Amino acid sequence: MSIVAMHAPDGFLEPGVALVTGLIALAVMAAAVRSSSQELGDRQVPLAGMAAAFIFAAQMFNFPVASGTTGHLLGGALAAILLGPWVGALVVGVVVLVQALIFADGGLTALGYNVINMAIVPAFGGWAIYCLVRRVLPSNAAGVIGATAVASGLSVVFAASAFSIQWLFGATAPVPFDTVFGAMVGVHVLIGIGEAAISAMAIAAVLAARPDLVVGAQDLNATQLADRPRVGARPFVIGGLLVAVFLAMVVSQFAASSPDGLEKVAEDKGFSDSATDHTFAQSMFADYATRGIDNENLSLAIAGVTGVTLTLAVGTGMAVGARQLRRAAT
Amino acid sequence: MGGGHAPNKIHDLVISGESSVHRLPPDVKLVALVAFVSSIAMTPRHAVWAFAVYAAILAAVTAIARVPIAVIGRRLLIVAPFLMAAALVPFIGDGPQTKVGPFNLSTDGLWAAWNICAKALLGATASILLTSTTPIPDLLVGMTRLRVPRPVVSIVAFMVRYLDLLADQFQRMRLAMAARGHDPRWLWQARPVASAAGTLFVHAYERGERTHQAMLARGFTGHMPDLDTPTRSSGAWLTALGPAALAVSVCIVAIVQ
């Protein structure tokens, strides 16, 4: 649960991607600083600082996963649900910055994509999913906990997809997009179960002690908050596992439709020097990520659909967050 | 996400010592670091000589700063997961093959693995040299001088100040659970640990509120006051930017080639 391309080091993606993602991350973080100062006023510094310390501390400690192996929390969606999406994104962004600057965990020139993948996408994407699931579930504490589980689990998968899409534009190694996408999303669907379980149980603890602190549950009154049928952790985890296996099968269906093994044989035999390489060589897509994909259209379609879904989710999260912010201000 | 982020406490990172590297103003060091690391990231992978020059520069700075190599080695473990991932690339990469020992490896994959390893190790070493020679409060002053927005610097300062405290608190909660026989092996047994994380958030938030009240009582206006900061000289700029300028020119030559 720990080896994942997230705190990417310097030079992991091409400089162009590092620059563009850096500018995007900078713009979103600037907006987050402004929105959170609107939201928190002069409490911004102490509360965001303390919350950042909490997320950092939570990432440092291991949780049991299976038979003695451990993993740790990423906390992007959890931060958004606890603190609201803008403050949440800001807090996790600060954590990523400090990890790069002070612990050399993640490269300084990789800050752009690292902040996007670990702070912006999980916080806003997770918030969008959270708001969506809350509409379906009953408005009580159990609904908040369930929505937290779904949102935090998916936020990890979102982060993995975001990295894969950046790989499509800035690959530095001859590993095609399909392989990276399949591997990243496959692994992160499993990691998402852990993230979902831990986030949901942590939110449950906060709801029990200080429900007023959970921004994502501010619409609930005292009786709704008291209404929480107990769900056992074991059925929850097993249920999550079943859903994840199902999702992984769907994803692998897509990824497997360009058979890498066969391609490799073709390359070895030397009869695949066909045109695929030249189509995109001049385009913005990194030569590496699209090279050797024999079904280029399909994998670009997957990339496109994923990209649109991600942008939609993150954009929805931002819009919903901004609307709630305005409503709170009036 | 290398499992377990911080091998050391955040305030024990500086290797105390008196060297010209330690004495340089923090903002100058930050600018030099960013320039140096950007040069590394932009250098084409085939310019092996350029990476040798970068390594030599880092070795020289390490020697001048008298940072023990063992310390740098230990802190470099943080990039280990990426080195392992990079080591896989020659096996799964496509394109023309090279025979290395008993294996048929992808030539581009070998170059890619070299590229990721070299850049990750050099970049991380440069960052580690900065934190080994610059106390965190100085780094924050440096960020302020470089016009990083005030709220961000203040939030980072707050976070850094309370990180060890919260981490220790969590550690004590785990210890107390272990003392009572809690030894979780599976995810569905994690409820007490996760609840402890939730409790820690409540504690952290309430501590933040208390601290905020205390700050207001002492006249806090939303911004941290400017403390007197040592001035920087043009000599310092020259000294610190020397290695960075060398790296930038090496990078340009490597690209032009």
Image (cartoon, rainbow, N blue to C red):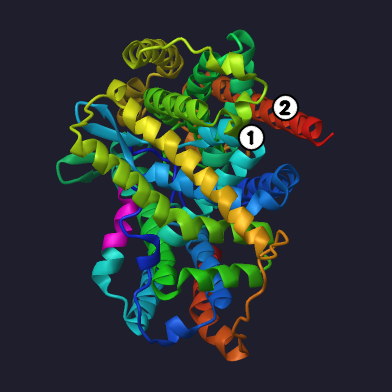
Q: Give the label on residue A85, or none.
A: 1
Indicate left or right for A181 with A130 as reference. Answer: left
Q: Is residue A255 visible?
A: yes
Magenta stretch: includes residue A19:
no
Residue B21 in the image: state x and y as whole percent: 44, 82
Callout 2 amino acid: Val
Task: From this view, report whether residue A325 is shown above or below residue A92.
Answer: above
Residue B250 in the image: state x and y as whole percent: 50, 72
Q: Main secondary structure of the magenta part?
A: helix
Name the residue furthest right.
Answer: A330
Q: Do residues under tags 1 and 2 come within 8 Å of each other at their CB atoms?
A: yes
Regarding mark 2 in the picture, which secondary structure is present there? helix
Q: Quadrant of the N terminus of chain A?
A: top left
Magenta stretch: includes residue B75:
yes
Viewer-side residue, A109 vs A117? A117
Who's the residue at 65% across and 26% down the image?
A218
